[in-house]
Image (spheres, grey):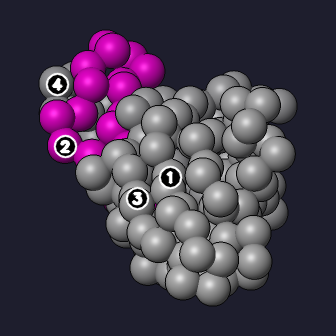
């Protein structure tokens, strides 16, 4: 059993509290990433999607997990279980220092997650508390105007990594 903590950071201009809409533990927020087989090292060609709300039975029939997937190269079966409760928003102060903040923890058996892909469904707020929802980070950035604060707001230079944790 190896646990991987997904962490992220970004450059925030006049924004704070960047996180998945409804928080990191939102049961419907999709996490997209590729998987690398722990047996043969093969990397999946397409991203895998997992959400907290969707579970599948374990192959041995004892419990559930969020993903069961076979390696297309060696046929080894692997599982991914999401462990909520670790995520927190990226504040403006942390972004300014380029600090990584935790987003979600994954218990991976047989494969390891790599290459997280930012997508739709993010939220942030401006320094004057204007809330921006349904932010799409698929293209790697977000630019908008805060009418209340009369200033441009943006998200850019997105970075993420999976770190092994105990």
Task: Give the numbered dot on residue 142.
Answer: 3
Q: CA distance from mark 2 to mark 1?
A: 25 Å
With 52 as the anchor, is 93 left or right in this view? right
> In what element is the residue under mark 4?
loop
Q: Between tags 3 and 4, which lies in front?
A: 3
Q: CA distance from mark 1 to mark 4?
A: 38 Å
Say which residue label 4 marks: 73
Q: Say which residue appears at 71% left-offset and 61% top-offset.
A: 16
Q: CA distance from mark 3 to mark 1?
A: 5 Å
Say which residue label 1 marks: 155
Q: CA distance from mark 2 to mark 3?
A: 24 Å
Quadrant where the C terminus is found in the figure: top right
Task: Establish if 153 lies above or below 48.
Answer: below
Kindly check if marks 3 and 1 are in contact, taking CB atoms under 8 A apart as contact.
yes
Q: Between tags 2 and 1, which lies in front?
A: 1
Task: Give the numbered dot on residue 46.
Answer: 2
Q: Position of residue 21 (x, y in %)?
A: 57, 77
Task: Give the mark nearer the N terminus: 1 vs 4.
Answer: 4
Task: Give the mark nearer the N terminus: 2 vs 3.
Answer: 2
């Amino acid at each position: 059993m190896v646990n991987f903590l997904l962490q992220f950071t970004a450059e925030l201009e006049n924004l704070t509290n960047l996180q998945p809409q409804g928080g990191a533990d939102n049961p419907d927020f999709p996490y997209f990433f590729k998987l690398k087989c722990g047996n043969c090292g093969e990397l999946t060609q397409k991203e895998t999607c997992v959400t907290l709300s969707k579970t599948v039975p374990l192959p041995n029939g004892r419990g559930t997990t969020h993903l069961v997937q076979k390696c297309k190269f060696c046929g080894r079966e692997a599982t991914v279980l999401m462990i909520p409760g670790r995520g927190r928003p990226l504040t403006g102060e942390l972004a300014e220092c380029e600090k990584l903040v935790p987003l979600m923890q994954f218990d991976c058996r047989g494969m390891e997650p790599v290459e997280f892909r930012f997508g739709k469904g993010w939220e942030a707020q401006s320094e004057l508390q204007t809330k921006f929802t349904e932010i799409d980070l698929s293209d790697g950035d977000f630019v908008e105007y805060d009418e209340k604060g009369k200033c441009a707001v943006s998200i850019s230079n997105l970075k993420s990594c999976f770190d092994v944790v105990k």
